Image (cartoon, rainbow, N blue to C red):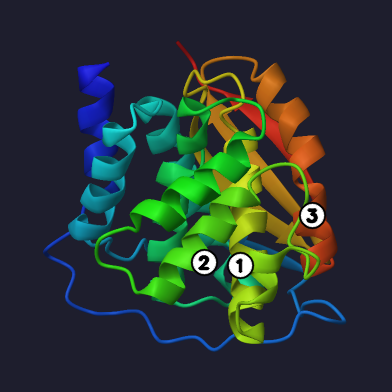
């Protein structure tokens, strides 16, 4: 467990040797779909993550006794997906920080009760705040965590409705990513060690690498990737690439 935690720390840590920041991206409407090349592989270099973001979220999670290894795995997978689908979601680097915090804290509400734990997660985040984020960003983190399961973002929900329209769009896109990342650790066993996202026409293929059959993960993926497909107007599927033992 300790070795796994150290490895995940390295995966989420800030790389001090990277000097060049990726370009700022503006949010584009997704109505009408995306312009994807006929054959493409998304494989951009992973940008740095501020250690303060990770530490602040972990500190809050540990205070409430959360399931840390699952939280780390989901956050790690969420960032992998974020980085490999940039031309689809067109989000900015600050959104990546928000996704990291939401990924680490998405299940914190289970320390209250597993039933409706996504709502408990929302409430804990709102009540406690997350160091390094503004009040509006904390509300976004709370929304993204709340929408990692069950219902998708809707203006029928007061907290979401009170966000500015542009932030509502950001929450939709981030929660779509987080739902897939959470599905890919459905067994709470870190079964998925790597993800490669490819596209052909309007189809996205998630190639999952790991040392097990990932039956729970693929089942959950097929269930929870539906929102991603609708939001971005693409079809989504996954396949398992077993690693040699």
Q: Which image quadrant is residue 137 in? A: bottom left
Single out the residue that lies furthest toward the top.
Answer: 245
Per the image, label 1 sits on a secondary structure element best described as helix
Point 18% across, 69% down: residue? 18
Choose between 102 and 161: the one closer to the eye: 161
Q: Is residue 130 above or below residue 18?
A: above
Residue 224 - label:
none
| The C terminus: image quadrant | top left
* Residue pointed to by mark 2: 140
Callout 2 crowding tier (Cα within 10 Å): few <14, some 14–19, many ≥20: many
Residues at marks 1 and 3, CA–CA distance in whole angstroms: 13 Å
In the rendered image, residue 91, in percent from the top left (x then y), is placed at 53, 75
Residues marked 2 and 1 touching at CB (< 8 Å): yes
Residues at marks 2 and 1, CA–CA distance in whole angstroms: 6 Å
In this rendering, the label closer to the viewer, 2 or 3:
2
Q: Does 96 sit left or right of 143 as displayed? A: left
In the rendered image, residue 193, in percent from the top left (x then y), is placed at 46, 31
Query: Sequence-wise, which precedes: disc 2 or disc 3?
Result: 2
| The N terminus: image quadrant | top left
Q: Does 219 sit left or right of 184 as displayed? A: right
Residues at marks 2 and 3, CA–CA distance in whole angstroms: 18 Å
Point 60% across, 73% down: residue? 170
Q: Does 71 sit left or right of 36 as displayed? A: left
* Residue pointed to by mark 3: 227
Point 31% across, 48% down: residue? 57
In the rendered image, residue 145, in percent from the top left (x then y), is placed at 55, 50
């Amino acid at each position: 467990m300790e070795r796994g935690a150290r490895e995940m720390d390295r995966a989420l840590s800030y790389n001090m040797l990277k000097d060049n920041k990726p370009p700022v991206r503006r949010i584009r409407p997704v109505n009408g779909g995306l312009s994807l090349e006929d054959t493409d592989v998304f494989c951009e270099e992973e940008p740095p993550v501020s250690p303060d973001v990770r530490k602040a979220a972990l500190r809050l999670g540990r205070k409430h006794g959360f399931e840390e290894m699952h939280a780390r795995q989901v956050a790690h997978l969420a960032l992998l997906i974020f980085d490999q689908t940039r031309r689809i979601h067109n989000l900015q680097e600050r959104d990546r920080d928000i996704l990291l915090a939401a990924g680490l804290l998405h299940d914190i509400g289970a320390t209250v009760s597993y039933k409706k734990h996504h709502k408990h997660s929302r409430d804990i985040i709102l009540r406690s705040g997350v160091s390094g984020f503004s009040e509006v960003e904390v509300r976004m983190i709370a929304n993204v965590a709340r929408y990692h399961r069950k219902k998708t973002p809707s203006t029928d929900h007061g907290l979401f409705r009170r966000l500015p329209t542009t932030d509502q769009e950001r929450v939709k896109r981030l929660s779509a990513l987080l739902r897939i990342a959470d599905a890919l650790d459905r067994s709470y066993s870190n079964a998925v060690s790597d993800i490669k996202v490819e596209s052909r026409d309007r189809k996205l293929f998630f190639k999952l690498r790991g040392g097990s059959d990932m039956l729970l993960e693929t089942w959950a993926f097929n269930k929870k990737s539906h929102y991603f497909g609708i939001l971005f107007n693409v079809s989504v599927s996954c396949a398992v690439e077993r690693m040699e033992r």
